Image (spheres, rainbow, N blue to C red):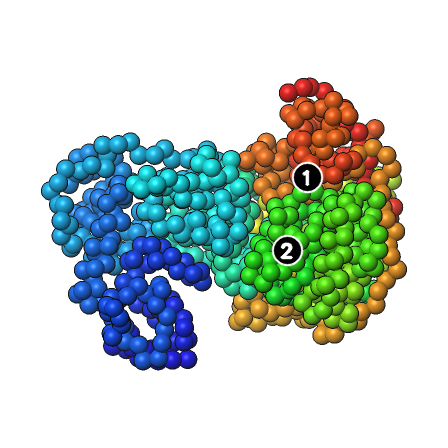
Amino acid sequence: MVQITLNGQAVEAQAGARLVEVIKANGVAITNLCYIDGLEPYAGCRTCIVEIVGARPTPLQLACVSQVADGMVVNTETAEVKRTRQSVMSMILANHPDRCLTCHRRVHCMPGDICLRDDVVTHRCLTCSKNYRCELQTSCEIVDQGDFEEPWVGEPRSYYETPPPEPDRGNPYLEFDPQMCILCTRCVRACDDLRHTGAIALSGKGHRTMIAFGTGGSIHESDCNFCGACIDVCPTATLMEKPNKWVGRADDWTNSTCNSCAVGCTISYGVADDRPVIVRPDRLNPFSRDQICVRGRFGYVAVAERERLTRSLVRAGQRLLPAAFEQALTTAVDALTAVKSAHGANAIAVLGSPLATNEEAYLLVRVARAIGTPHVDFSHGTVHRAVADAMRAAFGTDRVPASLTDLEQAQTIVVAALDIEDSHQVVSLRLKDAVIKRKAQVVIVSSKWTALDRWAAAIVRVVPGQEAAALQGLADGGAAPAGVDTAAWTRALDVVARGKGASAAVVYAPNGADGAARAGGAATAAANLAIALRGNEAGSAFHYLPTDANVLGIADMGIIPGTGGKSFPEIIEAAQRGEVKALVIHSDNPLLNAPGRTAIEAALQGLDTLVVIDSLRSTTAEYATAVLAAAPFFATDGTITNADRRVLHQRSAQRARGQESDGVEILAALANRLGDREAPSGVAEAHEALATATGYPTLAQVDAAPAQVRALVATSTTAKAQPAPAVTAASGGLTLATGRSLYTSWDAASIHSDDADKLHREEAVWLNPRDAEAAGIRTGDVVDLTNGAASVRIAVKLDDGVAAGTVYVPHYYDGGALMTLLPLDGAGMSPAALRVRALQTA
């Protein structure tokens, strides 16, 4: 540490730190319109000018490029500094449409008033969607720009003599208005250096220079993945979130956690009128830091408020009718009690959800115990337990100490996932960081092309079901599995052989639709590979990314079959046989999530009682006896446990709407009415109870060190390679690959919304051109995908990103229609073999 003098005050700082960051860290307001904290300075706006006493050739220096040195004397408020900043700012404002920025009358103007200063104004701060949350506006106030005597005052206005460039509002997420741009290039550098996407660039020359997406076309035609990092750094209204654009000025901010995947990115909701209106990344999570994905940023508006349940529902004949909460609760309790009295507790099963909080999961287990049933699971439960079993066999525990933050330091990384860019995008981002910053070598084992491929040293493209064979082959140094490109396999073997040691890692992300046998086999092979790379330290190198946000948390809480209890597939089979008569489902939709949709639908139809607790009238809820309206995830308080086993606080950003209730309150009331008189009724009480029961950290401990506390992590692991798993392969036909896609919302797909994929990018089957040619199919043709018993109608996209003999369809397409083509998950489930039948040509 060194000492400098800042505006007459002694300040300690890290030697070599950027002066602009030290100034801001010490609470001194300074303009810096082009600087992004943590990136190399661009020095384009020059508004961060300060005086450094004794500096050469002039005391006036840019704070962004100046590095702290011991004894440095810095002044930010001298008359010369102020005048220089004003002069620089006047040049920036020369081509900006809003004269309000320098007008002393702006505090007296109302949005509907005519501008008295410039009668040709068509756009001004008062009518700008970013008014009072604009960094350019704040910067003008910091330098007192209205006090600056511009040399061209009185000259004719020229800005409106040429038409401004057209804004791009053609997508559901971002709006781009080039006329507001000051060419700070923050968005370009955020897209390049923070996201490694490269979707934004400078276009044109001279006074025609402007920001462009892709080759200058629309945003949605570029490589943009709508993460919104450019919005976070834009100092003007050039780049804006489209949802809630005009109400995005927050009155308050609430720290919370995203629940769209197992990374658990920490976010902040901007709240106005007791509802979230904007989302920003929060740096609390040491892995996600200042980055989130499109699902995290826009997930809260994926479903319109009018499409959410704000009143409970009770069945009357063939219809579900609105009812008061007490009436719906009484209906649910009476129906469950009647089934228990007539058929016993074993005739009732309970399904939880990895989208629920730990507190909700704990109380759901209390509900099951109050009923007396051991049949407790969730729709991907068999997949998770298969992976956990494989980890216990290899490492002695499924609670390995591996931390995702270690990935950024790894030199060799093997990724076994269908498309980690879609399923866990921030993990993909950090892998790119490792490649760019540490020259890491990445090997990808996948059935389809992914956006991470261009950063990979080797890509092993496998037929679905061959993942285990490929991973085991990499561990053993064996021959390439059938159909794998031999040159790519040789490169992969070389990377693995050279990467053995302390900086190697394996990332495994199963899909919920893969089935337990395939997921468990791949997990075993991935664990064997980790052991081959790291030996006894393999437990610190194996990174398991569960299918959803809180899989690990709900399993810790007890959402697993009890002694003699049935798994999810067994519950469905028992319901079809008439053995299970009633089902309680909390925040899950097995018709969307689980393979075997035809069997699941038949089971739901045959139940005597179905109680659903959800914030949505999902496709499963349509079969319910009673639906208890719960608050959505962004209005729910509680904790989740991410892939790192970090316990993260998910805070409510919205008051309850209508008659919806918090999930903890609903489950506590249900448990109480079913006989558990001591069920905790609030989040704090529920967490205290679960901490006592499971050994989890207390809520006070979680909040004292946000995103730092990990739960139940093993202090030591073993390393015991397991026998090579059997390969699960399809028998004839085209082999199906499916997984979660980036742009399709779980909530919207759960209610079978036509707008679940707002970009409509993920509504086609990927078919290899060789397979298409053999079948006489072209891009845009509509086909039937069929397994012989069921079919799904879908448009075709020809793409060699899938291997010949493979088709890829997004899991959530058409509300999970694809799940009708898959069998109910069981011990022998293998990849589906399908046929394609052309129906309509493009």
Compared with 323, 703 (above or below) is below
Where does residue 625 sit, x and y in percent of width and height?
70, 39
Compared with 637, 518 (above or below) is above
Amino acid on which disc 1 is placed: Gly
Identify the residue at horizontal 54%, vertical 70% (top origin): 705
Q: Nearer the viewer, residue 313 or 299?
A: 299
Q: Nearer the viewer, residue 610 or 148?
A: 148
Dot 1: few (<14), some (14–19), or many (≥20) neighbours within 10 Å? Answer: some
Where does residue 240 sit, x and y in percent of width and height?
41, 44
Where does residue 31 sit, x and y in percent of width and height?
30, 59
- Answer with mark 1 or mark 2, whichever residue precedes in sequence: 2
Amino acid on which disc 2 is placed: Ala
Residue 446 appearing in the image: yes
Left or right: 536, with 234 as reference point: right
SS class, disc 2: loop
**Residue for badge 2:** 262
Where does residue 789 sit, x and y in percent of width and height?
83, 29
Residue 276 appearing in the image: no
Identify the residue at horizontal 23%, vertical 68% (top origin): 58
Nearer mark to the viewer, of 1 and 2:
1
Q: Quadrant of the C terminus?
A: top right
